[in-house]
Image: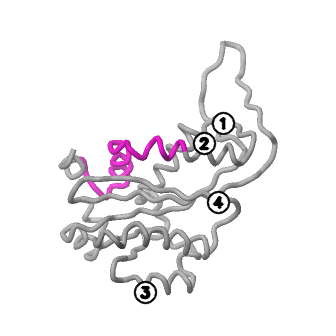
Amino acid sequence: MACDHLDGHQKGGIKDRAIFGFFDESGVSDKPVVVSTWGRKGITPVILSSGGWKNLALLGLITYQPHTGRTTNLAWIRKGSVNKQTILRVLLDMKRKYEPLRKRFILLWDGLPVHRSKVVKTFIETNKSWLSLHRFPAYAPELNPQEYQWSALKRKDLGNYCPPTTAALAAKVRRGIGRMKNKSRMLKGFLLKSGLWNVKELSEHQ
């Protein structure tokens, strides 16, 4: 596996039927993501933009249960930037969803400063009964499956899209995340691209 990229605690998580969660932040704005498209010969396609620069912060999670092969995704959308209170609210959502399952939840994310804030560290410390936290190596975003979901969202769902409002943009993001939610093969494709699991391991429960 993949196990080459995982430390002892994470390998142990596979044996004790843990749930792995891969978390990452991103952002979108009302400036369209320009992607290749088609047009009539001699006519260059034109994308009309509102000309603003209104941003939405995106926080996403892909989960995987190796013992069942089950995958799913979650997303949070908010206006403005991500701060420690944003991360704390997300962690509280995770607690409500995963603590009652009585399975260890192994959360992997990067070293963003807000992830290292005092309030976040306190939450992690007081929730060790169900939550185990690990950081990806620095400058290695390619190891995080969530990065590939962001890429698919921006190219497939937001490519050349000019939202009239931030509400319309948020709705488009939700539909895109929802489109991938029940596509286990796609989510496993993101896991495969990360190199954390190989084709054989991801095919065992299909």
Q: Earlier in the sequence, mark 3 or mark 1?
A: 3
Q: Which of 206 and 145 is in front in this view?
A: 206
Q: Mark 2 points at which residue?
A: 172
State the residue position of label 3.
Answer: 126
Task: Determine contact: label 4, label 1, CB under 8 Å.
Answer: no
Q: Principal SS element in the magenta part?
A: helix
Relative horizontal placement of residue 98, taking residue 34 as reference (left or right): left
Which amino acid lies under the numbered mark 4 shown in the image of this protein?
A: Arg
Could you give the CA–CA distance between mark 4 and mark 3, rounded to whole angstroms?
A: 26 Å
Determine the residue positioned at 67% across, 55% down: 56
Q: Which amino acid does label 3 sit on?
A: Thr
Question: Which residue is identified by label 1?
Answer: 161
CA separation in Å, label 3 and label 1: 43 Å
What's the distance in space between the residues labelled 3 and 2, CA to CA? 36 Å
Could you say whether the residue bearing mark 1 is in a helix, strand or loop?
A: loop
Magenta includes 176? yes
Specify few, some or many for label 3: CA neighbours under 10 Å numbering under 14, 14-19, or 20 or more: few
| Residue placed under numbered mark 4 in the picture | 78
Q: What stretch is highlighted in magenta?
A: 175-199
Q: What residue type is labelled 1?
A: Tyr
Do residues under tags 3 and 2 come within 8 Å of each other at their CB atoms?
no
